[in-house]
Amino acid sequence: TDDWTYEMSEWHLAWQEKFPVECREFVMEADGEKHRADVFIHNTIIEFQHSPITYEDFTKRNQFYLKCGYQIVWIFDAENIIKDPIETIIEPVHEKIRRII
C-alpha cells in the first residue's frame, strides 16, 4: 500500500490531465516499498503538490525516487502563498501575462 496516497484536488487533476493516461499514477517499487508517482515520463517523476507537505515527507519521496534511479520535478501550487517583502500576496504570473497580451 502507498502511504503517500491522498485525495486529489481539481488543481492536481488538471495538471495530471496534461499528460498521456499511461504516464499518470505510475506505480513503482524498490526494496519492498511501493509508491505511485503522479506522472512518470522520460525517466522523470513529476509530482504535483497542492496541499502543504512536511520537509520530512518531501525528503522521503525524493529519496525513494532517487533510489529508483529517476529524476524528480516538483510542481507546487503556491498561487495563494507567494508574498513580496512587505507580506502582500503577489499576483500570479499568468495574470500579468494576460494583461500584457
Image: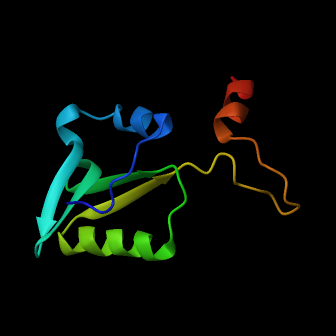
Given residues 76 and 96, the one toward you in this image is 76
Which residue occupies the foreground of this view, 33 or 40? 33
In the image, farthest residue toward the right: 86
The chosen color scheme is rainbow
Q: Is residue 62 above or below residue 39?
A: below
Residue 70: x and y, percent? 22, 64
**Quadrant of image for the N terminus:** bottom left
Residue at point 51%, 70% (across, down): 54
Q: Measured from the top left, where is residue 39 in percent x and y?
A: 28, 47
Q: How many marks?
A: 0
Q: In this view, does 100 lie above or below 58?
A: above
Q: Is residue 66 left or right of residue 28?
A: right
Residue 84 against residue 95 in the figure, above or below: below
Query: Would you place residue 47 above or below residue 91 in this image?
Result: below
Q: Is residue 56 left or right of residue 84?
A: left
Which residue occupies 13% across, 64% down? Answer: 29
Q: x and y percent of residue 46 in the render?
A: 34, 52
Name the residue: 17% across, 37% down. Answer: 22
Q: Residue 21, percent across and down?
A: 21, 33
